[in-house]
């Protein structure tokens, strides 16, 4: 891999935060042990805490040990030797000057300019400030020569509505080229989501039936069984629709509904995902009333950091429609929430019932029909429900499942973490697993009218769980 030959410096803004501790450092350490990082690399932490290099290395050592990585202490020691720390404030321009000077000194020791990867593991309200300061300090300028590059990784949510997303993207576009920008939706790097493309476009048995003639509806669910925990103050300014609807769920919808890109290239794949999201029907206020449900679990207003009269949603149900030839008339039920009856993320495709010589449909035949399910969590598997004759006298049918599970085939769940894939793809310059500016904008174009309609609408209260069809229930289901 060509990027391995080029020295690379990874700068993490928010280097002492939860995301870096829980996801980024474990992923980088795993990549190192698999020899998938550049041969010459440095990881530089940037945060407000005044730490020395050794203190930061001790911090990361504890992170690795707490994750239970089964590697030798020598592996850990060598990895930590590549770590450095540069204290600074996100809003302080002088701090970026110090960072630039430190990176230059490190490159001097290498004897050449390293490629730079900047990761914003920070709250979204700091994005604008960091973008500007990185550019003003010259940090965004790539190394001289054809092989040098500078790239920036940005976590979701990208903006808080259509207007703020457009303003943020305009600022980012003035400071960086599009091929430098990697907008993260980590769900795109999950094995089962990547497998949707393989499943759809490598198996001819489903492709002819992948349209509104044969598919009756699609149901996408992203449930968490926990509440907001200690993130109450943050969540109260975001809500479920911004947290998982605008990004994760719409990306799952795009993968299910997109056209064949023809070739496996980032530009083509991202264009087809974008086309789907742009084809979502924008709702009027009357359609928001008819096709959406806003819910809130009963204990939410008593959570730490939450306003006593908050009407922020912790649950949503949206019936969306894609206005194109393939999907016209097919409802896509989008559902997400906290304090649900179980933790799960699933995409379920319901095929229309077949009235055949074997079984004549009647008023009690609602359960008949083939069902295809992609399970993203807690397991990672794909199942198909089909119908066979029940043993015995007469022609009675019974359902059977054909299932593929990564755990069953590999014997374990030890496949790469999503953040390992995101880092590796960024180092390669492959934007397939990242959202484009138009995907982000199209998602906000669909979501923003719903958020505006919900602004003064009181949520339906629910205890724990939900009912099929979008009406939250009091109590367990």
Image (spheres, helix red, strand yellow):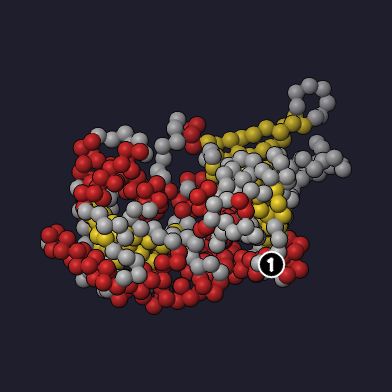
SS assignment at label 1: loop
Across the whole image, how many numbered discs are drawn on residues? 1
Q: Position of residue 246 (x, y in %)?
A: 57, 61
In the image, is residue 6 above or below residue 160?
above
Q: Position of residue 237 (x, y in %)?
A: 55, 62
Q: Quadrant of residue 322?
A: bottom right
What residue is shown at x 70% (from left), y 64% (from top)?
Answer: 457
Would residue 137 appear left or right of 409 to someone viewing this image? left
Q: Of 351 and 93, which appears nearest the observer? A: 93
* Identity of the residue furthest to the top in this view: 392
In the image, is residue 389 above or below residue 130?
above
Q: Please indicate, yes or no, whether residue 139 appears anywhere in the rendered image.
A: no
* Identity of the residue furthest to the right in this view: 363
Q: Quadrant of residue 274?
A: bottom right
Q: Quadrant of residue 135?
A: bottom left
Q: Of 127 and 309, which appears nearest the observer? A: 309
Would residue 16 appear left or right of 314 to someone viewing this image? left
What residue is shown at x 76% (from left), y 68% (from top)?
Answer: 286
Would residue 470 appear left or right of 380 to someone viewing this image? right
Q: Residues within 10 Å of mark 1 (few under 14, many from 20)?
A: few
Q: Position of residue 143 (x, y in %)?
A: 23, 69
Q: Of 473 and 79, which appears nearest the observer? A: 473
What residue is shown at x 53% (from left), y 70% (from top)?
Answer: 441
What residue is shown at x 58% (from left), y 35% (from top)?
Answer: 403
Would residue 39 appear left or right of 273 to someone viewing this image? left
Q: Position of residue 245 (x, y in %)?
A: 58, 58
Which residue is the site of mark 1? 456
Q: Please indicate, yes or no, whether residue 127 appears anywhere in the rendered image.
A: yes
Q: Of 159 and 185, which appears nearest the observer? A: 159
Quadrant in which the C terminus appears? top right
């Amino acid at each position: 891999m060509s990027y391995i030959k080029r020295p690379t410096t990874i700068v993490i803004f928010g280097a002492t935060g939860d995301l870096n501790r829980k996801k980024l450092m474990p992923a980088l350490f795993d990549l190192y042990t698999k020899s998938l990082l550049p041969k010459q690399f440095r990881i530089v932490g940037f945060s407000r805490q005044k730490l020395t290099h050794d203190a930061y290395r001790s911090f990361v050592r504890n992170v690795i040990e707490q994750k239970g990585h089964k590697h030798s202490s020598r592996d850990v020691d060598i990895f930590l030797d590549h770590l450095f720390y540069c204290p600074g404030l996100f809003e302080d321009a002088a701090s970026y000057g110090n960072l630039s000077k430190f990176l230059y000194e490190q490159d001097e020791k290498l004897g050449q300019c390293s490629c730079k990867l900047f990761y914003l593991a920070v709250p979204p309200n700091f994005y604008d400030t960091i973008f500007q300061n990185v550019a003003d300090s010259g940090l965004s300028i790539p190394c001289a020569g054809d092989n040098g590059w500078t790239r920036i990784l940005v976590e979701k949510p990208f903006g808080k509505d259509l207007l703020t997303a457009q303003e943020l993207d305009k600022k980012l576009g003035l400071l960086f080229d599009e091929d430098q920008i990697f907008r993260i939706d980590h769900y795109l790097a999950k094995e089962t989501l990547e497998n949707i493309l393989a499943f759809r476009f490598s198996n001819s048995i489903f492709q002819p039936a992948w349209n509104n003639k044969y598919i009756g509806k699609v149901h996408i669910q992203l449930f968490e069984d926990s509440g907001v925990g200690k993130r109450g103050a943050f969540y109260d300014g975001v809500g479920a629709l911004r947290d998982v609807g605008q990004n994760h769920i719409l990306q799952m919808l795009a993968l299910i509904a997109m056209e064949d890109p023809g070739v496996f290239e980032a530009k083509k794949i991202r264009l087809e995902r974008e086309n789907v999201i742009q084809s979502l029907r924008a709702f009027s206020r009357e359609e928001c009333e008819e096709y959406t449900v806003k819910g809130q679990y009963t204990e939410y207003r008593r959570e730490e950091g939450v306003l006593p009269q908050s009407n922020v949603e912790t649950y949503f149900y949206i019936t969306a429609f894609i206005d194109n030839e393939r999907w016209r008339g097919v409802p896509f039920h989008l559902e997400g929430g906290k304090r649900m009856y179980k933790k799960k993320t699933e995409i379920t495709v319901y095929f229309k019932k077949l009235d055949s010589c074997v079984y004549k449909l009647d008023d009690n035949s609602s359960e008949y029909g083939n069902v295809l399910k992609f399970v993203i969590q807690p397991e990672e598997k794909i199942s198909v429900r089909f119908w066979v004759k029940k043993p015995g006298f007469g022609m009675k049918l019974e359902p059977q499942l054909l299932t593929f599970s990564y755990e069953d085939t590999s014997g374990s769940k030890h496949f790469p973490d999503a953040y390992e894939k995101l880092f590796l793809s960024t180092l390669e310059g492959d934007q397939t697993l990242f959202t484009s500016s138009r995907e982000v904008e199209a998602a906000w174009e669909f979501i923003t009218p719903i958020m505006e309609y919900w602004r003064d609408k009181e949520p339906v209260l629910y205890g724990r769980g939900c009912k099929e069809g979008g009406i939250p229930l009091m109590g367990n289901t």
